[in-house]
Amino acid sequence: MKKRKNISIAILVMFLVQLSFGIGVPKVAMAEEVNSSVPQFLDRRKETVDFVYQYKDKTIVNNAVIIDNNIKFFVEENGQKHIISDDFNLLRYLSFIGVYNDNAYVVSDKDEKSSIYKVDLNTYKMEYVKEVPKYGDGQAYVDKIVIDSNGVFWYEADEHNIPTYDSNGRILYNNTKNIIYNDKGFSYEDIRLQKDEQTYDSFGHLKESIDGSLWFNKSIKSGTDNKVYKISKDGLVKEYAINNTKPMVIYNVYPSTESSIILVGRQLVTGSNGSTIEGEAIVQKYKINSDTLELEKEFKFPDTYTYSSRDVNGNVWINQDGVIYKLEGNEFIKKYIVDSGLKALEVYDDKNLVACGIVGFGYTPISIPETSGNSVDNSSGTNNQNTNTTTNSGTNSANSTGSSNSGTTTNNSSTPQYTNKEKFNVDVSGANAVLTLDSKQISKDTENTVVPTLSNSVQTVETKFDAATTNGGKGSVKVTANNVSLVLPFSTIDYNGVNNGDYIKLREAIVKNDDSLNSIKDIGKLFDFSLEMYKNDGTKVKDIHIFKSGKATISVKLTNDEIKNLDINKLSAFYYNENTKSWENVGGSYNKETMTFTFQTSHFSKYTIAQINGTLPQTGAIIDSTSIMLAALILILMGSTVLMKRNISKIKTSHR
């Protein structure tokens, strides 16, 4: 009875622990869970989207991420595509600026000149406009360009490694200069110490107000400076103090009306190791009161991929995993449902918008004719959207925020990690793809996400990034391709001997039907990971097999076909020991809902996902914990029985 009681108590404790994890966790509204009365647009265009924008009934798309036979820059209107250009060498470096007087403006970084072009949205003809004007001595790098309602171009730029010297001419420290300037002679500079928590990780994000002024923000790694800034039409910059003591990183400043403004960002909290990390996504509605912003309403959302946009009427929209919301008054209302893979959002007005993948994965245009009722037909192919946010493939996007059930408001804070989606080039040759990150865009102290869209024929993915830029960084690079996601902290890399120009190459190869798999019951393929350092001329400096510090996290999305003959309750990750020619268990966990297996490792080698059972070689102690506990229990019972018999025998002997 006592044993049964103890078991019952243990079961009850386990139940209560599981229940405690579920209490207070908001339910994320996925597309398939939303009320069917919400219009659904679940079909999507298959093009690989580099950037997408909506203007009235025209969807502007650049499809130039991978080299297949459908590389085009086009405008879709009423289901018809108007091809603007199919010049891949031009399109691969193209970024969107904005629309002015029925002309869409883009910039090409194909060369150092950074040429601006315009596309007539009535004739669909593209012509050269001008070069991007240099700032000062020309050392500043232009990150973003916007065009205002008067046709004036505004440039957000930064310049790094600006030295400060002592009296002896030695460099004391370096500075970073953040700059905003325009074609009319306006300029604004902010110089900060280029060290650790001092530099900005969020600067600019110019948004125009109804009165023609432009607003921007500045956030440092330890939080915002608790201000937003307004550039008036006469070129004066005014500061507005945010009446909110909670630290946050602001990603978007949306002037809503002349008297209100909406901030979108993430809460900042202190992590377990004492560092500042990002938590829940938040949307805050403020009233402009003299030179202060007074908080009126705050919305908090789960830590998921969620993007925001503002329409031409100043309304803020949210896309969270395919559920699209609009902020109406003090409540977020569900408006549309799209494929959950379409994370980003561009909105022109209530009836004209487009959702697209963060990097690739197609797009879905939504257009509701003025004469139609509430029913919507996704097969119409019409698309109207005009938003103030532009999604570039692999480009640092500041629209990421959060959203859950409409109108949900809380005052609690927690923090996820900001994902910096880096600008990168993709070169594909046969079954091999090479991803090269832009060293001017990569951030060494945050997670840099690379999510290329690749065909199934690609079996080897190489990711290259500058070694000096990431040396000493606290961040990581995350590469997600072909159902494999790999997160590599920069701390794992041995940078000893690194020189300027050296680069790191992270390689992942998928190998099917390898001979080494014959002795293991696996998913039918292995993953060969390697890490190397190279000189600028391509000469290998060294292999990095054992990590310096920390571990890489690898997640593999499995298919039904791969696991159909496996016991999913006995899945584990294994690495191939080249010395013993055998597979060794490294553990891991399997998520049945997402069909994703995740494990960590402190070195790179060949890995596979396989089933633990008696047919495997007994190297690396391939025995599950349940078997160990069962064997131990049997031994304990046997030992207790022997001891009991011995004690009984002694008692009988002593009484003779």
Image (tube, grey):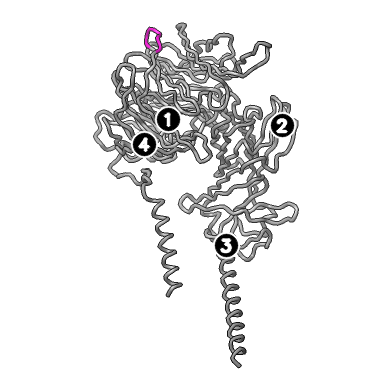
Lower sequence index among marks 2 and 3:
2
Question: Percent position (x, y) of residue 253?
Answer: 39, 23
Dominant secondary-structure state across the stretch colored magenta: loop
Q: Quadrant of residue 655?
A: bottom right
Q: Is residue 230 above or below residue 581?
A: above
Residue at 33%, 22% in the rendered image: 293
Question: Percent position (x, y) of residue 542?
Answer: 74, 36
| Three-letter code for the amino acid on which mark 2 is drawn | Tyr
Lower sequence index among marks 2 and 4:
4
Q: Are marks 1 and 3 in contact (CB under 8 Å)?
A: no
Q: Are marks 1 and 2 in contact (CB under 8 Å)?
A: no
Q: Which residue is mark 1?
A: 248
As measured in the structure, the alpha-carbon distance from the residue carrying label 1 to the one carrying label 4 is 12 Å
| SS assignment at label 4 | strand
Lower sequence index among marks 1 and 2:
1
| Three-letter code for the amino acid on which mark 3 is drawn | Ser
Q: Which residue is mark 2?
A: 534
| SS assignment at label 2 | strand
Compare residues 98 and 318 and report the one nearer the observer.
318
Lower sequence index among marks 1 and 4:
1
Q: Which residue is mark 3?
A: 625
- 192 magenta-colored: no
| Three-letter code for the amino acid on which mark 4 is drawn | Lys
Q: Are marks 1 and 4 in contact (CB under 8 Å)?
A: no
Left or right placement of residue 349 versus residue 523 in this view? left
Q: Which residue is mark 4?
A: 300
Lower sequence index among marks 1 and 3:
1
Question: Percent position (x, y) of residue 519?
Answer: 67, 60
